[in-house]
Image (cartoon, helix red, strand yellow):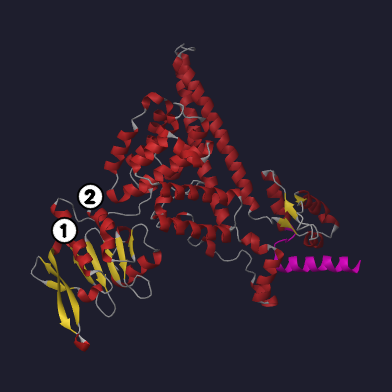
Amino acid sequence: MSIQKYIKEHITLLGDSTYTAPGIPDKKLNGAISSYAPDVNLEYVVALKDTSILSNGKEGCLFLGDAVYLKTAFEKPLKLEYAAIKSIVHTSFEKAASFGKTKTVENVEVFMKDGTSYNVTSLLLNVNLKGFVALIDGILAEAEQGKDFTNTSQITPLSEMSESVKQHYIKLVANFAFSDDQTIDVLEYTEIISLISRIELSAAMRLDIRRYMSNVDNLIPTEELLKTLKNTVEEGSFDILSKSLFKDVLYIFGKKNNIHDWAQHTFLCELADALSVTREEIDLIIAAIQHDEDILKHRKNDSQIKKSMKDLSAKAVAVGLPMAAIYFSGSVVGLSAAGITSGLAAMGMGGLLGFSSMFTGIGTLVLIGVGTYHGLKKVSGISDIENNKQREYMLQAIIRNTQKSLSYLIEDINGITQQLMLEMKKGNENSEKIHQLSNMLDMLSRGAQLSADKQNASQIEQVMTKLPATLDRDRLIGLTNKPTLEKVRQFIESCYELKHATEEEVHSKPVWQLKEGLTLAEVENLHNCFSEIDYNKVAQAAFATATTKAKNLFR
């Protein structure tokens, strides 16, 4: 095993509060690097032991593939390069204490190859000293067996890995698609193309993948692909890649089946065993897939997404599976994983939920006061629209991904069409090859239509993030009380319908909710209408609502 893997598997020798990449909390990682390892590239950090009282990572042990950094309060940090260490020794002796008692005093001394030595005991407060010595001894023993003291990235997403890794990854997904009926149907093909566009495969590799998926006879045995992939990927990244691969395969399975029935599928069971994916990890992966889909399916707002993401992160910690493994190839709904350092960032949560308001309006703040302003936004429903930033971001990513997928499908269609024309020119109209090419062309055309439908649906949902889910008719009437705005009011009202009241709601105020099934043109026109009448501006909205209610009261 590599030095990095050895450290990850034995870091718990140091005691509690130990973390391994890429599951090291951002707060602790940032604290450690800024406090005692400023020259370290965070991608190379393998493990961390946090000994700080405030749990901020600013004291402890930071392990890389070639060195360990040590720091405790009121002491200068120390960097120990493994290659320079000759030996490490733990000693202990009994010392007299008060009231006739004795206490054990421990020491850890590191002897360097250049003849110098360091007593690091004071730098290892709250660290299991025997465990630290055992860990360093183990690292040195691994080196004696030929392992190198090297630094490699622990958090490289799939999109930034080599073309060869991506190629074998996609071929393994294709093997699954072939496994049940010896063919790749239009839904499976479309999802694989979507995955290809997420991880940014080159044109040459896409051509190779297209040939691979064109005929079951082209398949390379799954065991051979896995072996090649394992030998190609850095050891520290293979475990993460394994979980990601199983997730992408499981997601495609779930598009046509009940995802919880995965254990009844032979290929999935064999793949889970080959990749050492546990049942607990699979349950977490399923939860992550459903989490992604629910954001769009149930139109979750930013607050709901943030809560569900925290719940998912807590489950990941309990299972011991890093969030980066779950989002190694991106989110199943279309988000790329390029540049991620944690599952949270992979979901676009970093910064998105902290966006400033769309309706800052300095003049309004001065006129009615900050507290009143935010209160009005809450009452008027404007804050609900502002709370859709994350979903809007995801929909934008889906649209970009779908556009790229469409271009790839069109590229495939053109390639197959040219092959078909060449075969027909040969006069072999009834040949088996023409039949295969015709079937593939039909599948690609249907796949392109599926992608186009997905893009249209995503564009509709994106516009809907900017529309009020429920209509304030008092406000609408107040804002459209001019003859020239009569048609605007009628159109807006036509896009909403009266919600069916439950027994608890029967005596409450009627709720007009946005209709389902609106076209892209309708939602775009609706958004333009709301903008034209300043429906989402706080001052105008509050005044219009108050005016209409006053008129109703007078009547």
Within 10 Å of disc 2 (Cα), the crowding (few <14, some 14-19, many 20+) is: few
Within 10 Å of disc 1 (Cα), the crowding (few <14, some 14-19, many 20+) is: many
Is residue 547 magenta-colored? yes
Residue beneath disc 1: 140
Which badge, 2 or 1, comes first in the chain's sequence? Answer: 2
Residue at x 40% of width, y 43% of height: 245
Which quarter of the image is occupied by the C terminus? bottom right
Q: In this view, does 240 lie to the left or right of 76?
A: right
Q: Is residue 310 left or right of residue 497?
A: left
Q: Can residue 160 be seen in this view?
A: yes
Residue beneath disc 2: 1
Percent x, y of residue 498: 78, 52
Q: Toward the viewer: 331 or 289?
A: 289
Q: Toward the viewer: 224 or 40?
A: 224
Whether residue 68 is situated above or below residue 413 in the rendered picture? below
Whether residue 504 is situated above or below residue 438 in the rendered picture? below
Q: As drawn, which residue projects farthest toward the front?
A: 100
Q: In what element is the residue under mark 1?
A: helix
Q: What stretch is highlighted in magenta?
A: 532-555
